[in-house]
Image (tube, rainbow, N blue to C red):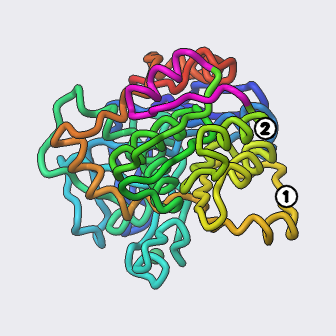
Amino acid sequence: MQATVLYGAGDVRFEDRADPVIVEPTDAVIRLPVTCICGSDLWPYRGIQPVASPAPMGHEYCGFVEEVGRDVTAVKPGQFVIGSFFASDNTCPHCRHGYQTSCQRFEPVVGAQAPRMRVPLAEGTLVATRDVPDTGMIPSLLALSDVMGTGWFAADAADVKPGVTVVVVGDGAVGLLGVLSAKQMGAERIIAMSRHQSRQTIAREFGATDIVTERGDEGVERIKQLTKGVGADSVLECVGTQESMLQAIKATRPGGYVGYVGVPHGVSLDGQQLFFSHVHLHGGPAPVRKYLPKLIDLVFNGTINPGKVFDLVLPLAQVAEGYRAMDERRAIKTLLQP
Ligand SMILES: [Zn+2]
């Protein structure tokens, strides 16, 4: 088969690779009807995260089970499944506490920007849908594998509940789906921080009630004005830079919550500032596996349509253009068709 490999900054190739096979008895091999590019793939693409050797790319996936190892009984060939970007056994103490991305046996999932892939720890990682979904629903199911699950975790970690005021820092796919998640959890007011017209439009469709275009301390000032000087109850940090993290902490009221899901790059926090801010901080790689059954139901019954974040569709062979479009912010998120 042909699949996506990153050789270094800006160097994405679509080239021949061995077909995935069952290596461990706990593996599954699945066929991917669609796949996509993640905002976090841009860190190595931009050279911010070094690439030591050619890396097979892609960690978001859903598709049809083709083959399973002898220890896998929870899913069967022919079923449609979705899994998280980290594989987990779903049985260890961390998994049982709902932190499957800290699983004691965790394995990263790689190679999803391809027509087929191997999923390790398939028994604990994959969740089958009750029926084979309609084609139109598949992009929304694909989004659950990472961006939607991550936006949901950001809102959950930020303690979003009915009636609260929420701020979302970041207007990438995760931030936009953080807006959607906060709306589902009953937030009364959702302030999206965004400078881009097309993203503001989607944020409003997903439930944003206010848009703030200012950033940094000016952005914080604007949030304070909008909340009568108090700050927000819940802030979702969906970027991972020093500026965005401080913006999130400073926009939160004393006693409020920051849910942070942007992978930190160059972030360092001052102990004194943190101490006197009085905010709860909770974040990390989203335990998507915990949320999959609920989110699959919400997609199947038509309550949410997170696939709306895909605003560019390309054949998988044009994956390099998909990266360029996201890097240049011409696209929010690229859907790829094998
Ligand atoms: Zn585990």
Q: Residue at x 61, y 23 (%)?
A: 326
Q: Type of residue at label 2?
A: Gly
On the rendered structure, is 243 left or right of 290?
right
Which part of the image, by quadrant, shows the C terminus? Answer: top left
Please tell me which residue lies in front, 49 or 122. Answer: 49
Which part of the image, by quadrant, shows the N terminus? Answer: top left
Q: Position of residue 126 (x, y in %)?
A: 33, 58
Q: Type of residue at label 1?
A: Ser
Q: Residue at x 78, y 30 (%)?
A: 9
Residue 211 painted magenta = yes
**Residue lying furthest left:** 131
Query: Does residue 132 lie above or below 215 as drawn?
Result: below
Please tell me which residue lies in front, 186 or 36. Answer: 186
Residue 88, quarter of picture? bottom left
Q: Position of residue 78 (x, y in %)?
A: 17, 47
Q: Position of residue 72 (x, y in %)?
A: 28, 68
Residue 47 painted magenta = no
Label 2 or label 1, whichever comes before in sequence order? 2
Q: From where the camera sits, is residue 245 visible?
A: yes
Tell me the element at label 1. loop
Indicate yes or no: mark 1 CB to ligand 1 under 8 Å. no
Tell me the element at label 2. helix
- The region drawn magenta spans 196-214
Residue 310, quarter of picture? top left
Q: Residue at x 23, y 26 (%)?
A: 136
Question: Which residue in the structure is indicated by mark 1?
Answer: 268
On the rendered structure, is 182 left or right of 274?
left
Question: Which residue in the structure is indicated by mark 2?
Answer: 216
Please tell me which residue lies in front, 313 or 150. Answer: 150
Q: Position of residue 87 (x, y in %)?
A: 47, 62
